[in-house]
Image (spheres, rainbow, N blue to C red):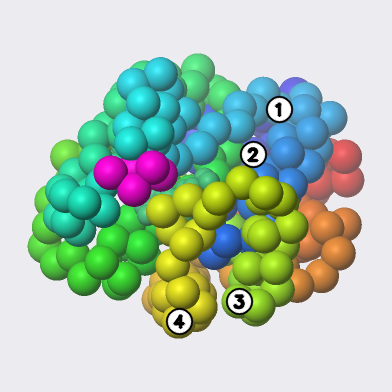
Amino acid sequence: MAEAAVKKSPGRGRFITFEGGEGSGKSTQIKTLAERLGAAKLRAIVTREPGGSPGAEIIRHLVLSGMGKLLGPDAETLLFAAARDDHVRTVIEPALNQGIWVLCDRFSDSTRVYQGRLGKVAPEFLNAMERVTIGDLKPDLTIILDVPVEVGMQRAAARRGTRAPDRFEAEDIRFHQDLRDAYRQIAAAEPERCVLIDANADAGTVAANVWAALRDRLFAAGSNVVSA
Ligand code: TYD
């Protein structure tokens, strides 16, 4: 049975978050990983933040429209927190408790980086929000996709086509450089949870590195999942 080969409490699903700046390729990599876990007979869902549950998707619409920006950084952070609270309670925790793996496109590191570093929201405020929304729910693994800002912005613009940039895409290049630095600092500060992966490579190479991170961190030695 595949789950028997997973390290630590095999009954519970694993929680994997993907982080990175604009155009870092998170959605492509999450999709590939979900397919690979499926092929290894592990049940997995893909979800995202802000959003991922009906209530949180409504808040997503509000923040990405720029409405949160009008309220100021603290209130905008509260909107992200409200969305996360609903998402954790109604989607993430129930799935993990059923042994389902959860692959989440952005999570609390995004708040730390975007609102904390860039919006200058106080760490005590962010800590309080985390206690309320996620409690002890720490990701088992966080993949941080790292890409030079110019490359990421070009990819994001190509993907967007004629659509207008959203609230955060519209920020200047300096903002995106700070974002990248902040993610790299998180990866350096929490090496047991985070893996920084060079995303300035073809999607296949990045996917192989993501899989290697899971193999090293989450699967027991000799597991048949590894070669799946
Ligand atoms: P999205 O279209 O999902 O962007 P991406 O494809 O880059 O993941 O938009 C989500 C935006 O919201 C993204 O710019 C980051 C921002 N964000 C925050 O500022 N704080 C948060 O806590 C989260 C989860 C996202």
| Number of other residues with Cα within 10 Å of mark 1, as a class: few under 14, some 14 to 19, many 20 or more | some
- State which region is magenta: 63-67
Judging depth in this view, the residue of 152 and 37 nearest the camera is 152
Q: Which residue is mark 1?
A: 42
Q: CA distance from mark 1 to mark 4?
A: 41 Å
Say whether marks 2 and 1 touch (CB < 8 Å).
yes
Q: Position of residue 183 (x, y in %)?
A: 47, 71
Q: Is residue 137 left or right of residue 165?
A: left
Looking at the rendered image, the disc whose residue lies closer to the viewer, 1 or 4, is: 4
Instruction: Judge whether 177 appears above or below 37 on screen.
Output: below
Q: CA distance from mark 3 to mark 2?
A: 36 Å
Instruction: Return the mark for residue 174.
Output: 4
Marked residue nearer the N-terminal end (4 or 3): 3
Q: Which residue is mark 3?
A: 149
SS of the residue under disc 1: loop
Q: Quadrant of the N terminus?
A: top right
User: In the rendered image, which quarter is residue 149 located in?
Assistant: bottom right
Looking at the rendered image, the disc whose residue lies closer to the viewer, 2 or 1, is: 1
Q: Position of residue 189 (x, y in %)?
A: 40, 76
Q: Position of residue 179 (x, y in %)?
A: 45, 72
Q: Is residue 200 magenta?
A: no
The kind of residue tagged 2 is: Val
Q: CA distance from mark 2 to mark 1?
A: 10 Å
Q: Is residue 224 visible to the viewer in this orientation of the structure?
A: yes
Marked residue nearer the N-terminal end (1 or 3): 1
Q: CA distance from mark 2 to mark 4?
A: 41 Å
| Number of other residues with Cα within 10 Å of mark 3, as a class: few under 14, some 14 to 19, many 20 or more | many
Q: CA distance from mark 1 to mark 3?
A: 34 Å
Instruction: Return the mark for residue 6.
Output: 2
Looking at the rendered image, the disc whose residue lies closer to the viewer, 2 or 4, is: 4
The kind of residue tagged 3 is: Val
